[in-house]
Image (cartoon, rainbow, N blue to C red):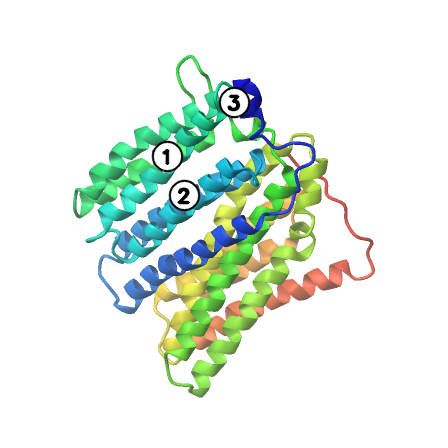
Amino acid sequence: MADERGAALLRGGVSSPRATFLELFFDLVFVFALTRVSQRIIDDLSATRQDLPAEIVQTLLIFLAFWAVWTFTAWVTSRYEPERPEIQFVVVYTMLGCLVMAVATPRAFDSRGLAFALAFVAVQVGRPLFLTLALRGHPRRLVTIRVASWAAMSAVPWVLGAVSTGPWRLACWSLAVVVDYAGLMFGWPAPRLGATRTSTWAVLGEHLAERYQQFFLIALGENILIIGLSFSGHSFSGASSGAFLLSFVTTVLLWRIYFHRAGHLLTEAIRVARMPGRLGESVSWTHLVIVAGVLATAVGYELAIVHPYRRTELSWAVFLMGGPAVFLLARARFEYEIFGRVSRSRIIGVFALAVLVPVATRTATVLALAAAATVLAAITVADYRRARGQAPEQPHPAL
């Protein structure tokens, strides 16, 4: 009887592959959270702080914490029935924890470190523990026990870092993130219980693909929010207006490049893959880098809109050119995952952006943004010319 009640939580053959309204509601928190992440870097760059590399590492750790929460939630709702009250409780509980983390993000390495760490630990430990109880005697509870054990291990450096200051907090939280991602990467191995790689999980592939597509759109939504807030908070000068328009066009180009063929066929690729879980696991790491590139690009937007005439500093050029370059690199891997090949335009685009970095440091920020937009536009045109007159390409997952 306990096994049957636990089995009722698992995805069945009649489950809808579409994301539920609660999951879309959950995503709204991440629009706010990603904005807080970007704003941390923007504030550091605008202040030209001497400890900028350390500040960027801090922000990267915060971003990785948010990604760990979101991606595991996506796997939970692809593995378990999201319409069940128990799973809905897990989503709402995680949503609350993420909101607390987002509120604490601007001062996570200052006065709100304890709030950030405790909220993260509460989600990462509490979620698998609740699922273990809800699964009752079902064999799959061994998976959630392993996940909870690794979360409890990482909770120690998270809390120790929260009650520490300065470099000690950075060191402890870096260790905690390594533990969290090592568990995810190696399947949370435990004595006598073994490991359970997500690549072997039975998931609803269509649902998982849709969730990663939606998270990419969340990142673009954060870009739009940054563009609007930056432009509305400053004078409507000609250069700022030009940077505003270029930022919007660049965001549209990111959307177009992502969804061109590979982005549209992600769901189909997971459906036809021999090991959907393995492709889903690979795609999750790829989207981590894609979203990081989109967030870095958003940082460049604000710099160009607020300081359009200012000569581009090297640290600024890293975001103006590096953000799109990171996106293109990850998009190239994404294309390989779906089709088993990579378009030359992606590699040429990355090379062009790298070459433009020293050039950008001799020009105004609005011109640097225009150069990055031109590279992305050239790739979009190349995609269009290559696809014109050709039959729709079918996915051939490389994994």
Position of 256 with respect to 2 (left or right) is right
Q: How many marks?
A: 3
Which residue was labeled with disc 2?
93
Q: Amino acid at mark 2?
A: Tyr
Query: Which percent across, then down, holds residue 57?
Result: 31, 50
Residue sitting farthest toward the top: 192
Position of 272 with respect to 208 (left or right) is right
Task: Say what secondary structure mark 3 lies in.
Answer: loop
Of tags 2 and 3, which is closer to the observer? 2
**Residue placed at 37% from the left, 66% from the top?**
316
Gap between marks 2 and 3 measured at Cα: 21 Å
Position of 273 with respect to 211 (left or right) is right
Q: State which quarter of the image contains the N terminus.
A: top right
**Foreground of the two, 166 or 276:** 276
Task: Say what secondary structure mark 1 lies in.
Answer: helix
**Foreground of the two, 320 or 182:** 182
Which residue was labeled with disc 1?
126
Gap between marks 1 and 3 measured at Cα: 17 Å
Q: Amino acid at mark 1?
A: Gly
Is any part of residue 322 visible from this angle? Answer: no
Gap between marks 2 and 1 measured at Cα: 9 Å
Which residue was labeled with disc 3?
140
For label 1, the crowd category at 10 Å Cα-Cα, with few meaning under 14, some 14 to 19 and many 20 or more, is some
Position of 120 with respect to 272 (left or right) is left
Query: Which percent across, then down, holds residue 391?
Result: 82, 53
For label 3, the crowd category at 10 Å Cα-Cα, with few meaning under 14, some 14 to 19 and many 20 or more, is some
Q: Amino acid at mark 3?
A: Arg
